[in-house]
Structures are given as structure tokens and as C-alpha cells.
Amino acid sequence: MAAAVVYLAVEAISFVGLLLLGRRGVVYNPRPAALNQEQKASLIRFLSPVRTTTLAMDPVIGWTRLALPSLAAPGQASEINAAGMRDDKEYAPFPSAGIVRIEAFGDSFTFSSDVTLQQSWARRLAGMSPRLEVLNYGVGAFGLDQAYLRYLEKGTAFHPHVVFIGYMTENFQRDVNVFRPFYSSVYGDWIFSKPRFQLHNGELVLLKNPLPSVQEYRRLLQHPAEVLQDLAGMTITIT
């Protein structure tokens, strides 16, 4: 009984101390040394040969969206087209005469995760004029670094007139992070790593995606403490 009282007292004092430190701008943000059960289950699903989601690993930018027609509602086209855009139609490499083609890159606000395809701002913007096309390359949970790298990878293939890269001020913390679970517990089943840029002698230097292959994710599942320690060394904490 006495031990339980001491334990609860220490926990309470620690909790109050962390609150006081937080008010002074000091935030305790430990790196996990192990995967939780939700992350393990997500990792096992990812390593399974059967795809059940349009979310997929990308060796360069971390993750992306791929077409998976079997997930579409009966009688409807997939909302991810063959080029990885959020769209139910395909586009020619060059826009037709008289068409202004806009490409949008960014995170879930660009992708419009919380609404249907028809309600997305990209589709509604395109609907304002028959002369407009908006190609939506947004991907949920992206940082600005990933949006930029996705533009470098995809941005010229369909010859846009205008390129838009969406950015939320909250995203700056994503730009110094390389492993989604370090950044937020909100997306508990996101187990993908990502690249980031580092400022060196006034120039941006790309730190490549640390887990660029299925084999690396198998290693994460088998040796989580070792891999998580390596990932933590590449991440900066901003409080």
C-alpha cells in the first residue's frame, strides 16, 4: 500500500512538473524505444502481399497513394488514378488547347481527406470554368519537403501552366521529422519513414528516406529498438 502511495505521489509531482515546464516552453517529447501494438499490426499489414489500402511506401518520398480499384464503391471509379492523383479520370500528358492546367501538391488539406472527391477544393475549382484543369497530387500527412520532392518527381510529366504547393504553418514540425510516430500519436497506424532537408553552409542538403525498402521495414519489425534509435538520431525536436 505504501509503495502504491509513493508511486502515485511521484507520478503526480512529475505530471505537475511537466505542466510547469511546458508553460516555460520546455516540452518532454520522448522517442519511443519500441513499437506499440497498433504500429506492429499496421507494419504487418503493410508487409502482407495483399494490399488493402491506397496508401503505399515510396522509396524516395516515404509514402504515396496508388490506385486500387477494388476499394472503389460498386459502379464507381477509383479515386486515385494511374498517375497517383486524387481523381477518377486520367489525363493526357499535354493539356488541350485553351485549357489552363494547374497542379496541386501538399498534405491532407490539398488532398481534401475529410470530404468526397466531388467536394474537394481541387474539383470545385476546376468546376468554376471549362477552361480549368486541376491535378491533385496531395498526400495526407506530407511535409513541405515531401510535397516538393513529389513535385520534382511528378510535376513536369503532365506539363502544367501553374503549380501550387499547399503549406500549413503546423507542418514545419514535419519538416524536421523522419518517422511519423515520432511526430504525432494521432496517426498511430502510420509507420512510414520520410526524408528531410538539412541546412548546411547556407544550402539545403537532402537526408534521404532512411527506410527506402520493404526489407528495411522487415528489419524495423524484427529489431525495433535498433532501428528506432537510428531514426531518432535523424530527427530534430521542436517545442
Image (tube, rainbow, N blue to C red):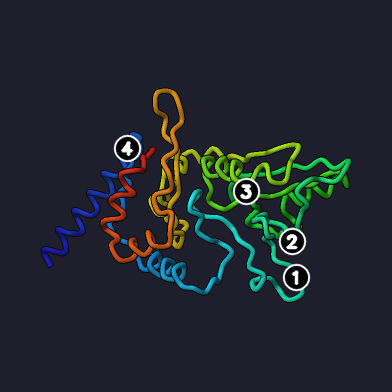
What residue is pinned by disc 1?
A: 76
Q: Residues within 10 Å of mark 3 (few under 14, many from 20)?
A: many
Alpha carbon separation for disc pair 4 and 3: 29 Å
- Which of pointers 3 and 1 lies earlier in the amino acid sequence? 1
Q: Quadrant of the N terminus?
A: bottom left
Mark 4: secondary structure: loop
Residue that label 4 marks: 26
Badge 2: residue crowd in 10 Å (few <14, some 14–19, many ≥20) = some
Amino acid type for the residue under numbered disc 4: Val
Whole-percent x, y for residue 120 in the image: 72, 53
Q: Nearer the viewer, mark 4 or mark 1?
A: 1
Q: Which mark is first along the chain, 4 or 2? A: 4
Task: Give the labeled residue for mark 3.
Answer: 109
Q: Foreground mark, 3 or 1?
A: 1
Callout 4 crowding tier (Cα within 10 Å): few <14, some 14–19, many ≥20: few
Residue at position x 75%, y 47% in the image: 134
Gap in Å between the C-alphas at discs 2 and 1?
Answer: 8 Å
| CB atoms of marks 4 and 1 within 8 Å | no
Residue 93's x, y, as percent?
Answer: 75, 48
Rendered location of residue 88, percent (x, y):
74, 61
- Give the residue displayed 43% in from the left and 54% down from the top: 212
Residue occupying the point 47% across, 40% down: 175
Residue toward you, 83 or 238: 83
> Which kind of residue does numbered mark 1 sit on?
Gln
Q: Earlier in the sequence, mark 4 or mark 1?
A: 4
Q: Earlier in the sequence, mark 2 or mark 1?
A: 1
On the image, numbered disc 2 is attached to which residue?
A: 88
Q: Mark 2 against mark 4, which lies toward the viewer?
A: 2
Task: From the viewer's side, name the closer residue of 216 and 191.
Answer: 216
How far apart, in angstroms, are the residues tagged by discs 4 and 1? 50 Å
Which dot, 3 or 2, sits closer to the camera?
2
Q: Are marks 2 and 1 in contact (CB under 8 Å)?
A: yes
